Image (cartoon, rainbow, N blue to C red):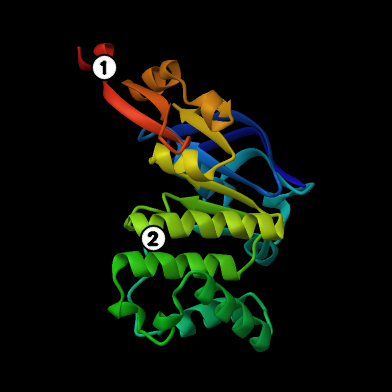
Amino acid sequence: MSLQVLELNVKQGNTQVISQLNLLPLTAGSVTALIGPNGAGKSTLIHALAGLLPARGQIILHGQSLPQLAHDERCRRVALLPQSLPQSTGLTVYELLLGGLLTLGLAPHEAEVRIARYLSQLHLSNLAMRPLATLSGGQRQMVALAQLLARQPELLLLDEPNSALDLHWQLALVEAIRTDVRERNSIALLALHDLNLALRCCDRIIVLHDGQCAADGTPLVVLTPALLAKVYGIEGRIEHCSQGKPMFVLDQMSAWSVQ
C-alpha cells in the first residue's frame, strides 16, 4: 500500500517545473512533508498528483495508475486542500460539508455521521450552522480540512495548509492529520514552509530544489546545515529543546547568498 512517483515531468505553460522526478514510495500510515524554497515545484507537484495539472510519467496509488482512473474514482480516492480558502457563500458550514459528501455519492445518513465526527474532532461543532461568509480566514481553513477529512480519501494532499492559521490551529491541524492517517492507514503529503511544523508532525521530509529531489528521508537526517545552505541559502541547524524535542534554529543568511 503506497504512492509511487516515477519519471514525473510537469510543465506550467512553457516552463518545465518538475523534471524526471522519482520518489521512494510513500507508505500507508505515513505523513510526509514536501519542503523547499519558493519556486521549487512544491505546489506544482501537489496539483499534478491531484490531477489538476497535466503530467508525464507514472503516479501509482496502491498499484493503480491515478491518471488512468475515471474522474469520479480519482476524486473519491484523492483529496486536495489548496492554499486558497473556501469561497464566502451564503451556505452554512454544515450545508457545505453535506453537499460535498452527497456529490461523492454517500448516503445522507453516512454523510451526516461523518460530518458530526469531523466537526467534533476538530472542535468546530459550534460553527456548524454559521454561514461560511461570517467565518474568519482561519476558521474557513479548518472547515476546509473537515471537508477533506470527511471524504476519507486514501491520499491527502495539502498545499501550505497552515497559511491562514494561528499557532493553536496549526497544532490542531497537524494532530488531526496524523490521527486520521494512522487510524485509516491513508497517506498524507503536505507542502510546508514551516520547518518546525515538519519536524513535529512528519515521518519523512522530501526536499525539492529546482524541480528535483534534493534530499529525502527522516527529518533529522535530511535537515543538515549543508542541505539548508545549499537549498535555502541560510545558516541553520537543528537543536533539541529542554523537553528533548527537535527544533529548527535560523542563524543567518549564508555568506554566498548575500554577495
159 over 204 or under it: above or below: below
Identify which amino acid the numbered label 2 is placed on. Answer: Trp
Q: In the rendered view, does 75 fall on the left or right side of 167?
A: right
Could you tell me which secondary element the residue under label 1 belongs to?
Answer: helix
Residue at figure coordinates x 30%, y 78% from the top left: 133
Instruction: Out of 166 and 38, give the one closest to the viewer.
Output: 166
x, y percentage for residue 106?
67, 80
The image quadrant where one finds the C terminus is top left
Residue drawn 64% across and 87% down? Answer: 108
How much space separates mark 2 and mark 1, taking CA atoms? 34 Å
Depicted 2 relative to depicted 208: above or below = below
Closest to the observer, 159 or 73:
159
Instruction: Determine whether, in the image, residue 64 is placed left or right of residue 248.
Output: right
Disc 1 marks a residue whose amino acid type is Ser
Q: Which corner quadrant of the image does residue 256 belong to?
A: top left
The answer to which of marks 2 and 1 sits earlier in the sequence is 2
- What x and y, as percent, mark residue 28? 71, 48
Residue shown at 50%/30% (left/top)?
207
Residue 91, image x, y percentages: 40, 84
Q: Residue at x 59, y 50 (%)?
A: 188
Q: Position of residue 18 (x, y in %)?
A: 51, 33
Q: Which residue is mark 1?
A: 257
- In terms of image quadrants, where is residue 197? top left
Q: Residues within 10 Å of mark 1 (few under 14, many from 20)?
A: few
Please say whether residue 11 is visible from this viewpoint: no
Residue 61's disc is: none
* Residue bearing mark 2: 169
